[in-house]
Image (cartoon, rainbow, N blue to C red):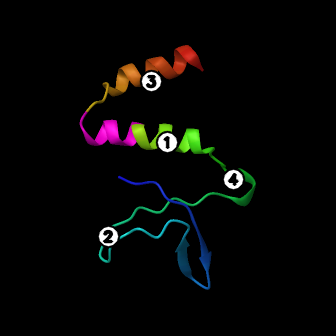
Amino acid sequence: MKVATGTVVKGTIIVDDPEFKDGTDVFILTREPEEEVHLSPEELAELEAGIAEADRGEMIPGDEFFARLRRYG
């Protein structure tokens, strides 16, 4: 899985990092303008590392994940 950002221009999504092959399936999540999220290069690297872990099956059970969220806020 790869994380990319982009902008809709005249109904077409323009991706900031266009390294996707033709035919690649994508999942698009939109956010409201006031909810913009800007990641530093370090934060983006951490997010991509987490996605790579999940792709390798290195995950924790959902109940443990939610318990950690409650514990650490």
Of badges 4 and 1, the one in the foreground is 1
Q: Residue furthest left?
A: 57
Q: Residues within 10 Å of mark 2 (few under 14, many from 20)?
A: few
User: Circle 1 sits on which residue?
Assistant: 45
Of badges 3 and 2, the one in the foreground is 2
Task: Indicate which disc, 2 or 1, sits on the residue closer to the N terminus.
Answer: 2
Of badges 2 and 1, the one in the foreground is 1
User: Circle 3 sits on which residue?
Assistant: 66
Front-most of 32 and 18? Answer: 18
Give the residue type at disc 4. Glu
Residue 29, image x, y percentages: 51, 59
Instruction: Find the magenta span and give its range.
Output: 50-57
Q: Residue furthest top?
A: 71
Image disc number at residue 24: 2
- For label 1, the SS is helix
In three-dimensional space, the C-alpha distance between marks 3 and 2, rounded to whole angstroms, equals 31 Å
Q: Quadrant of residue 2?
A: bottom left
Of badges 4 and 2, the one in the foreground is 2
Q: Residues within 10 Å of mark 4 (few under 14, many from 20)?
A: few
Give the residue type at disc 3. Phe
Give the residue type at disc 2. Thr
User: Circle 4 sits on which residue?
Assistant: 36
